[in-house]
Amino acid sequence: MPDLTPGYIIFIALLFFTAVLLFYYFFFFARLVFFRARPRKSTQQHPVSIVVCGKDEARNLAKNIPGLIFQEYTASRQILVVNDNSVDDSKYILQELNARYGGLTVLNLQQNAQHIPGKKYPLSMGIREAAHEILLLTDADCVPATEFWLQKMQEPYEEGIDIVLGYGAYHKLPGFLNKVIRYETFHSALQYLSYALAGHPYMGVGRNLSYKKNIFLKNKGFSGLNHLPGGDDDLFINKVANGKNTAIVIDPEAHTLSSPKRTWKDWRYQKTRHFSTSKYYKPKHQILLGLYSLSHFLFYFLILSCCIWYNWRIGLGILAGKSIIQQLVFARAMKRLNEADLRKWVLVMDLWMVFYYLLFTPALIKKEKKTWN
């Protein structure tokens, strides 16, 4: 039996956490790489209600609502916009859009819900007013990537499917911050989409999410979540999704696009708000996500410690082997999600994620702010 020197203990720990990461790459993430939507003998079109909520989003509504109106779709569809107590020109912008193009159902809210912070109340009102069983949700600052978004997002609905998870991407812009935002968005999607394929759906993003009205009403909407400002997308899906009632769509024609934050301060505020809801996930999902994050976080510290205290050749060899496998898996997943330009940044961003965890882990214990914009 080898001596249990500090260096040897570090080496064993490194092997363990490397094995954990490789397990996630092969068992979970590879599912997204090789995912193929079930072929259909004929095209189907269900009646769909598109629901958009906005608060003081006049500029985004003017820019993005036409992208919803001009979807290529022949079946019955409703575009329902919930204008949540806006004090800007949102009401008049929507009136103008309706006069010019038609096809909008506008719900102007003039009272705030007491003790229900965030987006849940306006979204609940919109869902209850929706005319069709299948709901397709997006945000006012999002636009469909193509005119086939609606068609693609409703296609997986068949017997037993109540939820469809999509990908909400960000516009590709110059600068390192844009790459950080898009990589973090990809990395998050890599997890929630591949976990869903493995039978463990745990979240979706409100920028591109669909579910049936009945599952919302049957589960009493956001009851149990109303005291939280966030969670109208991820916590609701965490509450109602399971391995049998959830499907995914990754076709680039079914993506939505949003404008990313332009400053580090704004992005940090946004991510802190989003990150804070994960502590309310089901315990099994917290364990799955926590083990991956912990392994990811410790890996580079253990590599450095192994090189110093055990054997630098072995440490660098493990780093090289893990990085090559990760590069292969992530690069192919990025191609599937139309983020192929990020492939050369995988190793840099993987190291950056160590600082990401340090930056946002305090959000797990911090009290949430009561806004949703």
Image: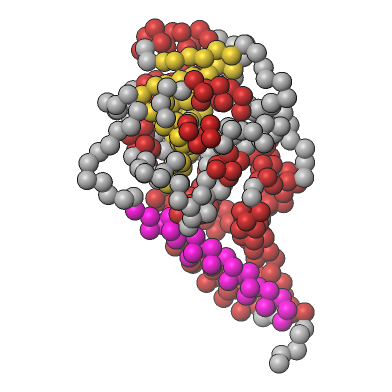
Q: Quadrant of residue 154?
A: top left
Quarter of the figure with the N terminus? bottom right
Q: Is residue 77 visible?
A: yes
Q: Is residue 36 above or below residue 295?
A: above
Give left or right: position of 348 versus 63: right
Q: Residue furthest left?
A: 41
Q: Nearer the viewer, residue 250 or 218?
A: 218
Would you say the magenta stretch is mainly helix, strand or loop? helix
Give left or right: position of 300 versus 328: right
Q: Quadrant of residue 294?
A: bottom right
Q: Is residue 199 above or below residue 155?
A: below
Q: Nearer the viewer, residue 306 or 337?
A: 337
The percent coordinates of residue 264 (x first, y second) are 65, 37
Q: Nearer the viewer, residue 210 or 139?
A: 210
Magenta residues, as a range?
8-36
- Residue at point 66% right, 70% down? 303
Q: Residue furthest bottom?
A: 1
The percent coordinates of residue 243 (x first, y second) are 48, 52
Quarter of the figure with the C terminus? top right
- Residue at point 25% right, 38% down? 43
